[in-house]
Amino acid sequence: MDALSQILEDIQLTHAEYLFIHGHERWYATLETRGLTVFYIILEGSIHFYLEQQAPQVLHTGDLVVLPLGRQHFLTDCIGSKVQDATKPWDLTPEFNGHRQEPLLLGQGSLKAQILIVRCALDVAMARPLLSSLPHLMRIERDAQHGKPEWLNIGLAFFALETSQNRIGRDILINCLINMLFIEFIRDYVERLPQHADNWLTALIDPRLAPVLQAIHVEPYKNWTVADLAQVACMSRSNFARYFQDKMHTSPLAYLWDYRLRLAAWYLR
């Protein structure tokens, strides 16, 4: 199992809830999602998406956005100052109630957008190194020439099928589908990172550090020494310790102990 797969084994999205929105004209809505991972899938039309301390995003049919660790944000059919002229913002937070089949109608007039919002829980402590390395907002846009990536087409088609019917085992299957989408988002992000980017995730594709991280996460209980880990990396002890510190901004044994403590806390919870 590669390093990213091993690390993601410890991080599972659970308790997925979804909400369909039919946006008409002159509306905007807010959503408080701190501590939750949130997906936005634009099924049809377009919306304006505002995340605190971020430039506004215009999302179109086929676009998919994920907030790895949700922050205060709002969405609307308006732009700029027109947002303030729209009707009172609708708080979407209490609208989530498991798997809600009937769409929430916002605004008046003709239908402008159809949106699927999925929110789920994530063990923040276990996922801390990963979350600290991801941007606040991750987006996959529909390519005008090639459309959505094939993995996304398959995943969304499967998701649409499951949300349209109430079959036994649906909850666990939807959780698995959301985990699949999240993993694909992370893979896509990692593959786009510059080789020398100052990011913890680059270690997962580093030929010297990836085997070390994999070994630590497979056997955290082993009495690892710096020399042992250097041997896994096929480096001398001194070069490995310096290289690990430069890339990870912590020492090998400090990383090991941090992971052990997070794992112990997870077991206690």
Image: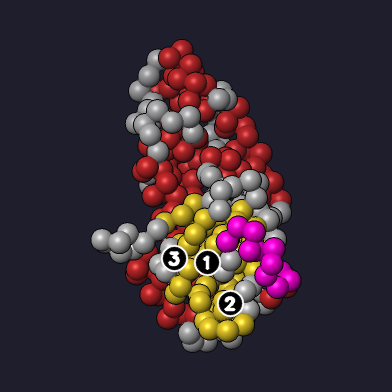
SS class of the residue under badge 1?
strand
Residue type, mark 2 in image: Glu
Distance (Cα) linking label 3 and label 2: 16 Å
Asked whether the residues under the numbered discs 3 and 2 touch, taking CB atoms below 8 Å apart as contact, a structural biologist would say: no
Name the foreground residue: 253 vs 78: 78
Residue 204, position as x, y percentages in the image: 42, 38
Specify few, some or many for label 3: CA neighbours under 10 Å numbering under 14, 14-19, or 20 or more.
some
Name the foreground residue: 42 vs 13: 42
SS class of the residue under badge 2?
strand
Q: Is residue 250 above or below residue 1?
A: above
Residue 262 painted magenta: no
Q: Is residue 194 above or below residue 172?
A: above
Q: Which is more N-terminal, label 2 or label 3?
A: 2
Q: Which mark is residue 47?
A: 1
Q: Quadrant of residue 233?
A: top left
Name the residue: 48% across, 16% down: 242
Q: Which is more N-terminal, label 1 or label 3?
A: 1
Asked whether the residues under the numbered discs 1 and 2 touch, taking CB atoms below 8 Å apart as contact, a structural biologist would say: no
Name the residue: 58% across, 40% down: 132
Q: Is residue 90 left or right of residue 105?
A: right
Q: Which residues are magenta?
A: 79-93
Residue of label 3? 60
SS class of the residue under badge 3?
strand
Q: Is residue 29 visible?
A: no
Residue type, mark 3 in image: His
Q: Is residue 14 above or below residue 221?
A: below
Residue of label 2? 25
